[in-house]
Amino acid sequence: MEEKKFYVKDVLLILAGTCLYAFGLVTFNIANDLAEGGVTGITLILRALFYIDPAYSTLIINIPLILIGGKILGKHSFYYTILGTVSLSVFLWLWQRWPIEVNLDHDLLIASLLAGLAAGIGSGLVYRVGGTTGGTDVVARILEKNYGISMGRSLLIFDILVLILSLSYIDVKRMMYTLIVSFVFSRVVDSVLDGAYAAKGILVISDHTEDIGRVIMAVLERGVTYLDGQGGYSQVDKKVLYVVVSPSEIMEIKRIVHEIDAKAFISVINVHEAIGEGFTYARPSKKIFKKKNQLT
């Protein structure tokens, strides 16, 4: 039952992502004569030069790439890629037949930012559940899986190559604005994949590690972990405290540690994703008087 709910959620996210992506493409890119990168950019070139509907060309061009992706990425990603590609074509067809006009007063900068935002969020939702919208997304996911290259970075490179070809139907001015679209797209994709907020991991080395841990658990209601450590110079064994918190709680952690041990060593590291039981970005509600009592 839980597995079924999981897949239903994935499907809904893919549909929502492709719907938003298609909306941005029709409403901001096509309406303002902005190009696009990847296979989508190629479909826009075909639209401008040969009047071929992107809803059809997107599906036709992606067929061989989907087959490649199915062999390399496995059954799970293969099915999700089929869903993402087909739904993108369907939503492109729908938004072109029933468009929603957004009056931007011919401001290409705003159009570029909105286009990158819509495409980035939409694609990011699809990538987050392990799917793609076909095209260079498949290649980008292969590069991420096998070589550790972020999808946002590889997609930006592909976009630039297609944008050069797009000069066949747009001028340099619009191409530069399209570069803004591609840059915003790549940044937003990475942000969506990393999560809405970047968590912070904190390492604390102190002679009073357990006291610090008890206060953090009582005041912030965050779980802590004790790691075994040894000083390289002193050769003294010590407990190292590790805790994952939201960025807004860093200063409070530092204050707690300083009040208990002013000589404690604190290291703050970026945590791009925190999953599993024991962590949530929702900050527990705390009473001021409870906090003061715990520190006294």
Image: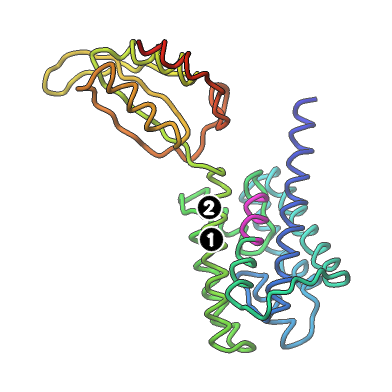
**Furthest residue toward left:** 233
The span picked out in magenta is: 118-126
Residue 27 in the figure: left or right of residue 136 = right
Rendered view: 34 above or below 130: below
Q: Residue at x 14, y 16 (%)?
A: 235
Rendered view: 21 above or below 197: below
The three-letter amino acid code for the residue at tag 2 is Asp
Which structural element holds mark 2?
helix
Q: Residue at x 36, y 37 (%)?
A: 269
Prevailing secondary structure of the magenta residues: helix
Rendered view: 192 above or below 216: below
Residue 186 circle label: 1
Q: How many marks?
A: 2
**Furthest residue toward front:** 289
The three-letter amino acid code for the residue at tag 1 is Ser
Quadrant where the image shows the N terminus:
top right
Q: Residue at x 80, y 57 (%)?
A: 87
Q: How is the image coloured?
A: rainbow
The answer for how far apart the CA atoms under marks 2 and 1 are is 6 Å
* Residue 150 among those drawn in magenta: no
* Residue 122 among those drawn in magenta: yes
Looking at the picture, how far across and down is residue 286, in whole percent? 53, 20
Which structural element holds mark 1?
helix
Q: Nearer the viewer, residue 133 or 91?
A: 91
Residue 190 circle label: 2
Looking at the picture, how far across and down is residue 151, in whole percent? 53, 55
Looking at the picture, how far across and down is residue 37, in whole percent? 60, 71
Looking at the picture, how far across and down is residue 3, in whole percent? 75, 29
